[in-house]
Image (cartoon, rainbow, N blue to C red):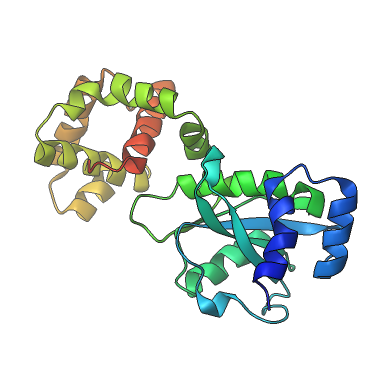
Amino acid sequence: MRRGTRYEALLGPLLAGGAPPDLVTRAARRLGLPERGRYAVVMLGTPVPDAAVVEGPDADGSRWWWGAAEGSAGGAESREAAVVLLGPAGPARAAARLRELGAGPGGVSPVVGSLAEVGAARRLAGTALLTCEPGSREIVRLDERLPAALLVSRPELSTRLLAEVFGPLLTLVPAERSLLVETLETWLECGGSVGRTAARLGCHRNTVFNRLRRLERLTARSLSRPRELVDLVLALDVLRLSSAPP
C-alpha cells in the first residue's frame, strides 16, 4: 500500500510543514524512507488514478507515497498529494509518468534534500498547480512556470496588471478580442515570426501585422520594446489563468 489512514497519518505532518525533528525521524522510519534524499511533492487537482498507487518503485526507481494535503497557496481545500523519493531522471520523469496515467491537472515541486523540507515543497507544488489553465489536465513543474507562479502568488497584483495592460482590449466584443489574443499567442509561440504566424493561422502576413499593430495601439505597448513585451506576456498569462474566456 502507498496510501490509506496509516500513511496519511504519517505524511500529514510532513506535508503541513514545520514538523519537529523527532516526528520527521519517526515518520521516516515507519515509512521506510531516508531522512535525506532527493524528494519532490506532487499536488493534483483531481483524484489520483488507481494505476498511480503502486507497490515498490516505478520504472525510474522513484518511490511514491500518496496522501491528502491542504490546498495550494493557503487554501483549505484538501488535495491529493504525493511525496516522491526521486529516481535518476528526477522530477521531469515524475511529471511524465503522471501524464502517461492521464492524471491532472497537477503541479510538481522543485527537488528538496530532505523529508523535513517536503512541507515547503508541498507549498511550491500547490503554486505550480495554480498555473494550470482552468479545465486542463496538464502536469507542470514549478521551474517551468516561474513567471506565472509569481502572478498566481499575488492575485491582487495580477488583477491590476491585467486591467492596466489589457484594459482597452477587454472592452472589445468577445470574437474580436479572441482574434487579437490568439494572434499574439501564436506570434509568441512562433518566436516572433510573422510569416510562421500567418501560416499557422491561415491568413496573410499583412493580416498578422495589422492585428499586432492594433493590439499595440490598444495596450499602448510595443512588441519591439523588451520591457513592454514583458508586460504583454505577463498580462497574457493572467488572462490564460482566469476562468473567463479570452
Q: Is residue 129 left or right of residue 31?
A: left
Say above or below: 26 vs 71: below
Residue at image coords 55%, 38%: 74
Please identify the quarter of the rendering in which residue 20 is found: top right
Residue 49 image point, x, y percent: 50, 74
Residue 171 is left or right of residue 7, and the answer is left
Q: From where the camera sits, is residue 182 visible?
A: yes
Q: Is residue 127 above or below residue 47?
A: above
Residue 212 falls in image quadrant: top left
Considering the image in quadrants, where does the N terminus appear? Answer: bottom right
The residue located at (62%, 67%) in the rendering is 93
Q: Where does residue 122 sit, x and y in percent of width and height?
A: 64, 49
Quadrant position of the C terminus in the picture: top left
**From the viewer's perspective, is 187 left or right of 107?**
left
> Measuring 59% from the left and 49% from the top, which residue is drawn there?
125
Q: Nearer the viewer, residue 83 or 237?
A: 83
Compare residues 55 and 26 and report the one nearer the observer. 26
Q: Residue at 65% across / 56% down in the picture? A: 41
Q: Please determine whether, in this image, residue 168 is positioned above or below residue 46.
A: above
To which quarter of the image does residue 80 belong? bottom right
User: Residue 48, position in %: x, y?
Assistant: 51, 69
Q: Is residue 222 above or below residue 122?
A: above
- On the image, the x and y values in percent for residue 141 come to 56, 53
